[in-house]
Image: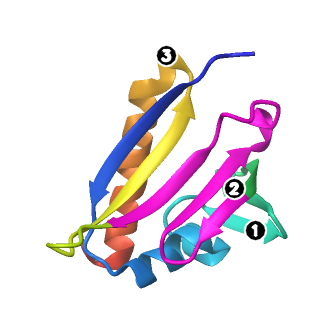
Amino acid sequence: MNDKIKIELEFPIQASPQLLYQYIATPSGLSEWFADNVNSRGELFTFIWNGSEEQAKLLSKKSEERIKFRWQEDEDDTDVFFEIRIQMDDITKDVSLMITDFVEEDEVGEAKMLWTNQISSLKQVLGSA
């Protein structure tokens, strides 16, 4: 089993938690920025990029707060997941998306760049770029 490294990223984003949640927790929302297409059947989500499919199991979600998945290929490793969390500062009301992901040691830079690009796409969809 490969040991994956936990990475945590924060992206300030100008959108309400209610709106953001629609984009992180629904197949139609995720397909606007995260993948070319996303389908779900119960807890199983299928993400499609350039014709290739990856499946992830929905582990948990909390309305307007977070969603957590585990890729099928990681199903034997219960410590591995990816989570998108909406965080709002109580005082300033600034909203950030907090990303937690687990990646191979030699893919950390690539993964950070990928998330940065994906969140950039999300900001464009939201009109907050």
Query: Distance from label 3 to label 2 (Cα)?
Result: 24 Å
Q: Callout 1, which amino acid?
A: Asn
- Residue 66 in magenta? yes
Residue at screen point 52% across, 64% down:
66
Please tell me whether residue 79 is drawn above or below residue 12 in the rendered image. Answer: above
> Which secondary structure lies at badge 3?
helix
Residue holding disc 2: 48
Q: Which quarter of the picture shows residue 94?
A: bottom left
| Segment tinted magenta in the rendering | 59-87
Residue holding disc 1: 39
Query: Distance from label 3 to label 1 (Cα)?
Result: 30 Å
Residues at marks 1 and 2 touching, judged by CB atoms closer than 8 Å = yes
Please tell me whether residue 49 is drawn above or below residue 4 in the rendered image. Answer: below
In x, y percent, where is residue 124?
Answer: 32, 70
Residue at screen point 31% across, 50% down:
10
> Which secondary structure lies at badge 2?
strand
Q: Callout 3, which amino acid?
A: Asp
Earlier residue among tags 1 and 2: 1
Earlier residue among tags 3 and 2: 2
Residue holding disc 3: 106
Residue at screen point 65% across, 35% down:
80
Q: If the image is split into quadrants, where does the N terminus sit? A: top right
| Left or right: 23 in relation to 37 | left
Task: State the residue lying farthest toward the front.
Answer: 90
Task: State the residue lying farthest toward the left.
Answer: 92
| Left or right: 120 in relation to 60 | left
Please tell me whether residue 1 is drawn above or below residue 113 in the rendered image. Answer: above
In x, y percent, where is residue 41?
Answer: 85, 69
Earlier residue among tags 3 and 1: 1
